[in-house]
Image (cartoon, rainbow, N blue to C red):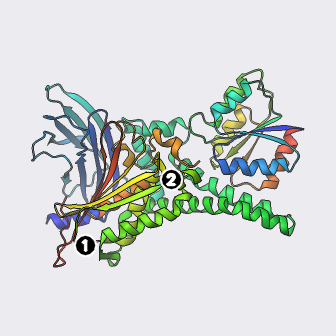
Amino acid sequence: MKNALLKNLQSLDGSTFGLYIRSQGFVSGALYRLDGETWVQVMVAESEASWPAAMSLDLNYSADRATQGFVKYDLSSSQQNNKGKWSYLYFPEQEFASVQLMFVVRPATGKRVRAGELHAGLEACASRCRSLLEHAQFQRATSEDSFQQHVSAMGVDLRTLIEHELRTPMASVTGYFSLLDGLEEQEQLDCFREFLPVIRDQSRFALEAIEKLSLTLEGVQSKKDNSDVVAFDPAVEVEKICQDMTHQVVDFVTPQAAERTNIVVNQAFDHACVVAASQQLFRWAFWEVLKNAVIHARQGRIEVLMYQTDNMFVVDIADDGSGLSPGSEELVFLRFYQDPSTFASRKGKKGLGLGLFLARQIAERHFGRLVYIRKQGRTGLFRFLWPMQEQDGQSLKKEA
Amino acid sequence: MKKVLVVEDEAHIQRLIKLVLEKQQLSVDTVSSGEEALQYLNGGEKPDLILLDILMPGMDGLQVLRTLKQNSATKSIPVVMLTALAQETVVLKGIELGAQDYIRKPFHPQELAKRVVKLAG
């Protein structure tokens, strides 16, 4: 029964929410409506930097403003705590228009700290665009943290930010081509040689933006056709992606930075492993995280370490940059969030802030994870976890 | 020679505009943010026209425009907004704040050149 329900949930167009409880931790989840029933999926993040020991998180929930129930999440350091695990609120035979979630943090001292209140709308949306915009407005209205404030401070909403990210590279492409009109043949050729890297660069940005928007608007799950799931050796894929990145790094960083970029790949196991996944989405997700490391590396050194643990294939990607701002460990996986400390290291392009969001979605779609682990001070690494297949071909995908 | 200040955070767009306007015998200075634009103008420079991008990190173009028009030393400098935003409300807000004209991205270089030359006098 549980497997069937999990499958149904993942095939739905669910509106998601995220609440960062400052200095405490992160709660995320999704809302679904299926065949006249309402589901709320909640996960309390297990970030190492969050949730001081001996705490609990209380969730009081209501639907259409009528009180429904109460859930307590154990956040203690015990092995049976609720950190990193999905839980569900289920409203059978009831299709609610809205669900209200109120989180209350209980620290070790027993003092109650109100975490925040979320109001989630479950309106049927005719198009994914409208769904995305409403979700963004919902996050802006209820988020306790600064990522939406950052966007709001720019004076525009998220839809216009998307338009800007597509129109600006197209302005470059069309503008530079237009400059070639009316020139003499030789001058045209000389100018074309000069403009070609810019045109190629900006075209690629535009295509990347479109690809990310397409994945975001359609939902990662709808891109995953069952027939695309294949068994493959992820270590081989990771090696290939790192090699490809070495050749393309000049597209993302300055020529000087590209010169010193060094991606070091190590693996701490001596036998092949197999995962079952969409190979295209696996490559896309890993590429995005690796690209992120390349862009933010200071001296250009990126370390990729592969190993196996607890039937999971794990890849750690660490760069020698300054790391994320404190408190951003979960924010960085939210849609459109861009850590302010990273603005200076991008090659004149802010980007949409969708890469890590989508990479995580892809990992979770395959019952894996993508997390940021903070190390000493501000440095840290991104960690991918993918469930491995048993040698007899049986899937070892873990249930949430 | 007439001088134009281009306020635009995207390096490629900056370069494109500079190429286009220098062909029209205009002198072009470029800055990459609203804050840099105000520093440039507070340093005593007085361009004949400002081409101002709207969506920039930090201080956006509308804030810069508001500041320019509140300052007696800069309020008479004509401003043309450069915007990737399709929303009419943003454009109207700019006009309300005192911008002379606006150009939408992607733009045709000849169109940009014609409008800038006309307004820069």
Residue B46 % position (x, y):
80, 29
At label 1, the amino acid type is: Val
| Residue pictured at 22% horizontal, 42% vertical | A61
In what element is the residue under mark 1? loop
| Residue pictured at 53% horizontal, 41% vertical | A344
Q: Earlier in the sequence, mark 2 or mark 1?
A: 2
Residue B84 % position (x, y):
64, 49
Q: Which mark is residue A274?
A: 1
Of residues B112 and B38, which is closer to you in this image?
B38
Which residue is denoted by mark 2 in the rendering? A260
Badge 2: chain ID: A
Residue A142 % position (x, y):
37, 38
What is the total number of numbered labels drawn onto the structure image? 2
| Residue pictured at 36% horizontal, 72% vertical | A279
Pointer 2 and pointer 1 on the same chain: yes
In what element is the residue under mark 2? helix
Badge 1: chain ID: A
Task: Using the rendered image of the protein, determine whether residue A198 is visible from the camera's viewpoint.
Answer: yes
Q: Quadrant of the C terminus of chain B?
A: top right
| Residue pictured at 83% horizontal, 37% vertical | B3
Is A154 positioned to the left or the right of B70 in the image?
left
At label 2, the amino acid type is: Arg
Q: Distance of mark 2 from mark 1, alpha carbons? A: 33 Å
Mark 1 is surrounded, within 10 Å at the Cα level, by few (under 14), some (14 to 19) or many (20 or more) other residues, namely: many
Camera-side mark, 2 or 1: 2
Query: Which of the 4 image quadrants contains residue A192?
Result: bottom right
Of residues A372 and A148, which is closer to you in this image?
A372
Q: Quadrant of the N terminus of chain B?
A: top right
